[in-house]
Image: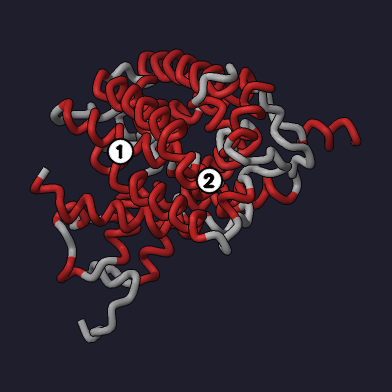
Amino acid sequence: MPELLRLLQEPWPWYVSGPLIGLTVPLLLLLGNRAFGISSNLRHACAILLPNAAKPSLFRYDWRAQSWNLMFAAGLILGGVVAATLMRDPQPAQLTGAAVQSLGALGVQVQPGLLPAELTDLTRPATWGLLILSGLLVGFGTRYAGGCTSGHAITGLSTLQLPSLIATVSFFAGGILSANLLLPLFLR
Amino acid sequence: MISTTPTPTATGRPPTTSTAHLLLRQWPFLITGLLFGVLLIKSEAASWYRIQEMFRFQSIHMYGLMGSAVLTGLITTTLLRRAGPRALNGETIHVPAKTGPTSRYVLGGLIFGLGWGLAGVCPGPIFALLGSSLLPMLIVLAAALVGTWAFGAVQKLL
């Protein structure tokens, strides 16, 4: 039993969890011919929440036909609950020394958990700025690009789609710029 | 037809019972989502630290994770499409092609990436982290909804 508990609590190595993540694509196709993608839920939520009169045409469609996607998102939340209760990792992420050093230079201490204090301490105005700007860019960008890391980087590349390769390269270009140039403005 | 108060389900005619029924039939997707949420956290793809490490090219972790995910998805999806053309619900398996001008993928992708590098989350981890009771993610989710709406509002100008 302690062995099993340790296995559940420890992070799973990438060569185990990576292939399992990849299996989501054929599994959803097999279950119901569904193309895996999560950011569509943001669009569905807008379609559900916006009053009809004030709805841009992007949100005028039958979201009920896509309800599987909303169930998947509900599952994600439940998965977070399960992982945080039964499988919580008491150790901080085992980053490389170089990563610990770079983050340290930005004033960020690597602590147990998934987010540093800089993203959870809501008494700092910079935290609000970081969270809001990040969400705005992710929401706008994913709809503009027609998908996120799941729809493009996993599903799109798994089905050899050139637009997804272009989108994935751009995701990374933006991320590299952001992590190295934009993020430091919000820390310290 | 008598309802004048805007409720979350007031977008169409069907009563809530049919929506609930529809959702109940979709339980396999709830389970798949649950497993995926656990995977996002246990693989540390939902860890801000790991995303920062990735964008600074300081570890193989996230590259190995995404590379092995894509390779596995590529092989298994190709095999599935060759072996059985039908899904369990009887539909013919078909992955819609991504279409549209390249500028959309470049500019949209860059904007998405700028957001990804800040809070270290893409749409999947936002939900999984919320479930882990990391409530600041509610701010990211709300902002992402505003961002999605903003794209819908200016789409015709782009």
Query: How far from the left and from the top, in percent, is residue B112?
Result: 34, 38
The chain to which mark 2 is attached is A
Mark 2 belongs to which amino acid?
Answer: Leu
Q: Residue at x 55, y 59 (%)?
A: A124
The chain to which mark 1 is attached is B
Instruction: Say if A25 sits above or below B134 in the image.
Output: above
Query: How far from the left and from the top, in percent, is residue A24?
Result: 49, 30
**Which of these two is toward me, A177 or B124?**
A177
Q: Which residue is mark 2?
A: A187
Kindly give the residue lying farthest to the right in the view shown: A2
Q: What element does badge 1 sit on?
A: helix
Same subunit under labels 1 and 2? no
| Badge 2 density bin: few <14, some 14–19, many ≥20, Cα 10 Å | some
Mark 1 belongs to which amino acid?
Answer: Ile
Q: Which mark is residue B111?
A: 1
Q: Residue at x 77, y 37 (%)?
A: A91
Q: Determine whether, in the image, residue A175 is placed left or right of residue B128.
A: left
Q: What element does badge 2 sit on?
A: loop
Asked if one can make out residue B34 in the rendered structure from this viewpoint, the answer is yes
